[in-house]
């Protein structure tokens, strides 16, 4: 019985795949000697589309910002590809229109090395677009417990975290699995200098005395698009904003903390190591409401 329900549900899920602009109807194989597969050499963006039931409008959130960041990643990886943001944007919007998508989606746009060349290859770049259904818990987000990872965040001098490269997630994987073994649900990174950096797939914010704090741009973070939106929303509603270096010792002084990221959305943190945090803090609740309004253009 359980399996039957699973089959029915999975048939209803959106899962569309495009390879170099062409729709894939079936599974596609890449070579076992492909360098992106063998060495994790790729860069990508994860983008959410929010659908407000009844509105007939799907908001592909901050698509231009994602495409700009992807352009920077491609450049940093020396991927010589004719990357045209307008063409890619139109392609994504066309897929959404052609498929009459009316639900929340996650769009993954990935650039990688084609064929069987070396990891040093700079030409012969392909791209894929995957669009699939995704759940949003922005109305009532679950809290998460984080442990400070024993693994440090990769640094700008070795594997720059501001490049959204697939291989960076090996660092995230080590940290997540290590903290989960110690009973936490997620991991928080320190950088090489002992400052709070970010979580494994999202940026972090803290709240104290009515003000918000987030690790500064030079804290070895991915410059999160959600982080940027929260900063703008906070400033517009006169909440004091501090983008600063956050020493580990300061964590115990915060009243509240939350994650911010495309996948994580806004997620309250109930505990960091032994420090218990308020998951219903009024400043967090206000930002959550403002973020929902930003997405849907209205109160939901
Ligand atoms: N940091 C890391 C390591 C991430 O993977 C992500 C998710 N892209 C973020 C932060 C949040 O970035 P954004 O808000 O742009 O999704």
Image (cartoon, rainbow, N blue to C red):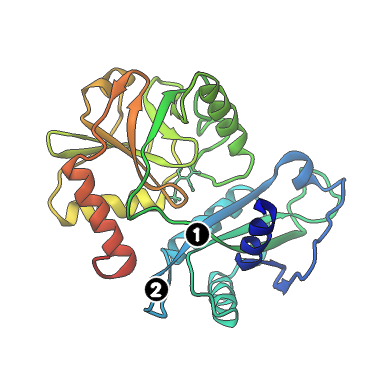
Q: Quadrant of the N terminus?
A: bottom right
Q: Tell which of 139 and 254 is nearer to you.
A: 139
Q: Measured from the top left, where is residue 9 in percent x and y?
A: 61, 62
Q: Which residue is mark 2?
A: 53
Q: Tell which of 239 and 263 is nearer to you.
A: 263
Whether the residues at callouts 1 and 2 have beta carbons within 8 Å, the answer is no
Q: Tell which of 61 and 103 is nearer to you.
A: 103
State left or right for residue 279 relative to residue 225.
Answer: left
State left or right for residue 174 relative to residue 139.
Answer: right
- Above or below 94: residue 252: above
Q: Crowding at label 1, few (<14), some or many (≥20) Cα neighbours within 10 Å?
A: many
Q: Which residue is mark 1?
A: 47
Which numbered disc flags the more N-terminal residue, 1 or 2?
1
- Above or below 111: residue 144: above
- Outermost residue on the front side: it is 1
Q: Quadrant of the C terminus?
A: bottom left
Q: Measured from the top left, where is residue 298 in percent x and y?
A: 25, 69
Whole-angstrom CA distance, mark 1 to mark 2, is 19 Å
| Quarter holding residue 278 | top left
Mark yes or no: residue 35 visible: yes
Mark 1 and ligand 1: say if the CB distance to the nearest ligand atom is below 8 Å: no
Q: Residue at x 70, y 42 (%)?
A: 40
- Above or below 15: residue 217: above
| Quarter holding residue 207 | top left
């Amino acid at each position: 019985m359980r399996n039957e329900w699973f089959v029915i549900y999975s048939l209803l899920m959106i899962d569309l795949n495009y390879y170099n602009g062409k729709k894939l109807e079936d599974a596609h194989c890449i070579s076992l000697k492909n360098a992106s597969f063998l060495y994790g050499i790729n860069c990508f963006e994860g983008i959410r589309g929010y659908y407000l039931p009844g509105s007939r409008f799907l908001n592909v959130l901050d698509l231009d910002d994602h495409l700009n960041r992807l352009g920077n990643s491609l450049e940093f990886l020396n991927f010589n590809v004719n990357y045209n943001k307008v063409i890619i944007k139109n392609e994504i919007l066309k897929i959404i229109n052609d498929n009459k998508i009316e639900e929340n989606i996650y769009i993954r746009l990935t650039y990688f090395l084609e064929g069987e060349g070396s990891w040093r290859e700079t030409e012969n770049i392909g791209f894929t677009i995957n669009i699939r259904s995704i759940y949003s818990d922005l109305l009532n987000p679950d809290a998460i417990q984080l442990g400070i990872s024993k693994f440090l965040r990769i640094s700008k001098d070795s594997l720059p975290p501001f490049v959204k490269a697939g291989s960076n997630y090996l660092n995230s994987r080590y940290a997540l699995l290590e903290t989960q073994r110690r009973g936490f649900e997620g991991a928080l990174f320190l950088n090489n200098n002992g400052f709070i950096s970010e979580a494994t797939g999202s940026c972090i914010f803290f709240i104290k005395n009515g003000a918000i704090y987030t690790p500064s741009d030079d804290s070895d973070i991915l410059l999160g698009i959600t982080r940027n939106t929260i900063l703008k929303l906070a400033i517009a509603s006169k909440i004091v904003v501090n983008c600063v270096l956050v020493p580990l010792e300061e964590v115990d002084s915060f009243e509240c903390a939350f994650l911010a990221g495309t996948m994580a959305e806004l997620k309250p943190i109930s505990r960091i190591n032994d420090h218990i945090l308020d998951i219903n803090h009024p400043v967090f609740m206000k930002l959550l409401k403002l973020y929902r309004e930003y997405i849907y253009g209205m109160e939901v």
